[in-house]
Image (cartoon, grey):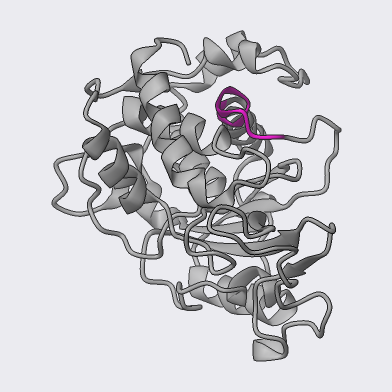
Amino acid sequence: MMETGASMKVGVLLVWAGSILAAVPAGAQPAKSESATETVTVQGLRQKDAAVERHFSQSMLEPSGVDEHQYALWKQKLCVQVSGLDPAMAALVERRITQIAARAGAPFDTSNPCHPNAVIYFTSHPQALLDAIAKKQPERIYSHNLNPATITQPAQSWYMTLGRNLNGEVGIDAECGYKGLPDPPFCGSPGPSLNTRLETGLSPELGSATVLVDIKAVEGISLGTLADYLAMKVLIPLPPNDLCKPAPSIVNLMVKDCDGRTDSLSDLDVALLYGLYHSSDGRLDQLQRERLVRGMRESLETPGK
C-alpha cells in the first residue's frame, strides 16, 4: 500500500528552505508569474544556435501518441502533491514547482487544497508502490507510455496523455481494456475535427504525472536541487530513458558519468519550459515545434523571460 509522510525520512539538506520561505510568506499562493521570477535561479551557457535549441528540445521531450508532431503539456490547472516527506519539506517542494510553473506560463491551481493531478512519491520501496498504483489507477501508468511499470531509475516518471478535438471531446490516449484501463469513451483519443497539412483539429495535453523517487538515492541532495529536478519531471513529458542530455540540464542530475549535470535549472531548461508553454497557437498544431524553438530563443536572448 502507499506510504505516508509520517513514516518516511529523507536525508536532504535544507540549505534552500530559508530562501524560499523568505521569498514566499507562509500560506501564500503564487498567483502571478512575476512573483516567481525572482526565486528561480538558473545556470548554464547562453545558446544562440537554433540547432542546439532544436536538438536539446528533441532530447528532452517525448512526442505524443495523439500526434507525433506535437508535445503534450499542461492545459488544465496543475496541482502538485508530494508524499513521503516531512509535511514542511513537502510543502516547500510543492511551492517551488508551482513557482517554476508560473514562470514558464503553465496553468496552476491556486485553491487550497486542490485536487492533485501531479503526484510525487518518496519511498524506500518504489517497485511495490508502483505496483499498487498501477493496480488501483492503471490509467496513470499505462496510458500511452513507453516507460514500463518497472523501476529502473532513482527517480522515474509516468504520464497520462489526453487527446482533445475542436468539438471538446476528450479521451485518454490508451488502448481500452489494457491492464484494466477504462472502457470508451474515457479511453481512446477522439477523432480529429479536421485534417490538413497544418491543422489536425486534435491536440494532446497532460492529464496526470506520477513520479516515484527512491528515497535512498537522493540522500545528501539539497532540497532546492531536488525540487528543480522534480519540476522538470512534472512539467514536461520526459522520455522514459535516462540518457545524458546534450547540454547542461538539471535533468542530468542522476545520470551516471554525465558532464552536463547542474544543481539548479540551466538556462536551456528555463528556455525549454518557456518555449513549450508558449507553443500553443490555436489550431496550427503542426507548427508547435517551430514555435517552441522560437520561444526558446526568445527566452535565451531576453534575460528574465
Residue 158 percent coordinates (x, y): 54, 64
Residue 237 percent coordinates (x, y): 50, 54
Which quadrant does the N terminus fall into?
Answer: bottom right
For the residue pair 144 and 148, the one nearer the viewer reads as: 144
For the residue pair 34 and 152, the one nearer the viewer reads as: 34
- The tally of labels here is 0
Left or right of 169, for residue 10: left
Q: Does 285 sit above or below residue 35?
A: below
How would you classify the magenta stretch by its main secondary structure? helix
- Whether the magenta-drawn stretch holds residue 106 is answered as yes
Left or right of 173, for residue 249: left
Residue 213 percent coordinates (x, y): 48, 56
For the residue pair 181 and 17, the one nearer the viewer reads as: 181
Is residue 227 shown to the viewer in this render?
A: no
- Whether the magenta-drawn stretch holds residue 210 is answered as no
Left or right of 4, for residue 291: left
For the residue pair 176 and 123, the one nearer the viewer reads as: 176
Residue 20 percent coordinates (x, y): 56, 17
**Residue sitting at x 47%, y 33%:** 275
**Residue sitting at x 66%, y 47%:** 283
Q: Which residues are magenta?
A: 100-107
Is residue 172 shown to the viewer in this render?
A: yes
**Residue sitting at x 21%, y 29%:** 49
